[in-house]
């Protein structure tokens, strides 16, 4: 996937394409990391690149359950959804995230009207009071927002792990040619 979203055909295509782009840049923040690096918390917070991948996977899946009016799934608490456990691998987290992305796209493809109401779950303190429903459109916009927020967090964490930044990582992950102004990321100690 290139560094920018391709031209879009319509609203549904735009929402899904922008969500896919934000998922992609979040995944790219994990490019080349070991499980130990993905689990590391290089700043003062509890955040890790692997934990962020786990959290956005949990969050996106929960929102799709909400669209489908299914009970909230998963046994992880909110705080636990941010932690990559010792028995979890980065590859497994990335695979789960890809499966959730496919499910989201399948569910949204089956929705005939993006304005369809999505009832607001009760008892969640950060949900605004007095609102009965959002729309599928609102949920998709929220997923773009949530994923972009955490992609930015992942960029900061990655830079703290090994100095890698977004565009050199994209260049390496997508095999862009080296230019005088953009060198693809290479692991420390690797020859170019």
Image: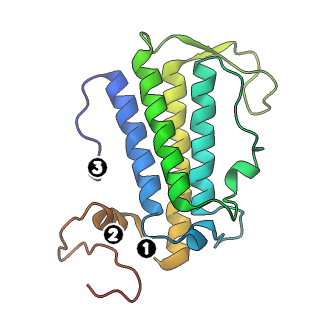
Secondary structure at numbered mark 1: loop
Q: Position of residue 105 (x, y in %)?
A: 42, 29
Label annotation for residue 1:
3
Number of the front mark, 2 or 3: 3
- Pinpoint residue 22: horizontal percent, then vertical percent: 43, 46
Circle 3 SS class: loop
Asked which quadrant contains residue 182, the reply is bottom left
Circle number at residue 109: none
Q: How far apart are marks 1 and 3 (CA)?
A: 19 Å
Residue position for label 1: 164
The CA span between labels 1 and 2 is 7 Å
Left or right: residue 167 versus residue 150 is left
**Disc on the earlier residue, 2 or 3:** 3
Residue 51, placed above or below residue 191: above
Q: Residue at x 75, y 51 (%)?
A: 80
Coloration of the structure image: rainbow
Could you tell me which residue is drawn at 37 percent across and 45 percent down? 21
The relative height of residue 96 versus residue 129 in the rendered view (above or below) is below
Asked if the residue under mark 2 is in contact with the one under mark 1, i.e. CB atoms within 8 Å, the reply is: yes
- Which residue shows up at 78% across the image and 29% down it? 124
Q: Nearer the viewer, residue 18 or 93?
A: 93
Q: To which residue does mark 2 refer?
A: 168
Residue 142 is left or right of residue 128, and the answer is: left
Q: In this view, does 6 lie to the left or right of 158?
A: left
Percent position (x, y) of residue 72? 71, 28
Verify CB contact (< 8 Å) between mark 2 and mark 3.
no
**Camera-side mark, 1 or 3:** 3
In what element is the residue under mark 2?
helix
Residue 177 occupies quadrant: bottom left
| Residues at marks 2 and 3, CA–CA distance in whole angstroms | 14 Å
């Amino acid at each position: 996937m290139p560094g920018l979203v391709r031209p879009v055909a319509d609203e549904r295509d735009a929402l899904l394409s922008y969500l896919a782009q934000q998922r992609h840049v979040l995944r790219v923040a994990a490019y080349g990391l070991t499980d130990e690096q993905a689990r590391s918390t290089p700043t003062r917070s509890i955040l890790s690149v692997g934990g962020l991948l786990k959290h956005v996977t949990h969050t996106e899946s929960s929102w799709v359950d909400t669209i489908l009016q299914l009970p909230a799934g998963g046994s992880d608490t909110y705080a636990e959804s941010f932690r990559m456990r010792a028995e979890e691998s980065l590859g497994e987290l990335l695979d789960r995230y890809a499966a959730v992305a496919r499910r989201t796209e399948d569910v949204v493809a089956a929705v005939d009207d993006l304005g369809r109401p999505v009832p607001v779950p009760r008892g969640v303190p950060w949900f605004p009071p007095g609102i009965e429903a959002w729309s599928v459109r609102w949920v998709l916009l929220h997923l773009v927002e949530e994923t972009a927020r955490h992609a930015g967090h992942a960029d900061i964490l990655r830079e703290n792990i090994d100095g890698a930044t977004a565009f050199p990582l994209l260049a390496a992950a997508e095999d862009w040619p080296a230019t005088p102004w953009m060198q693809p990321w290479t692991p420390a100690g690797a020859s170019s």
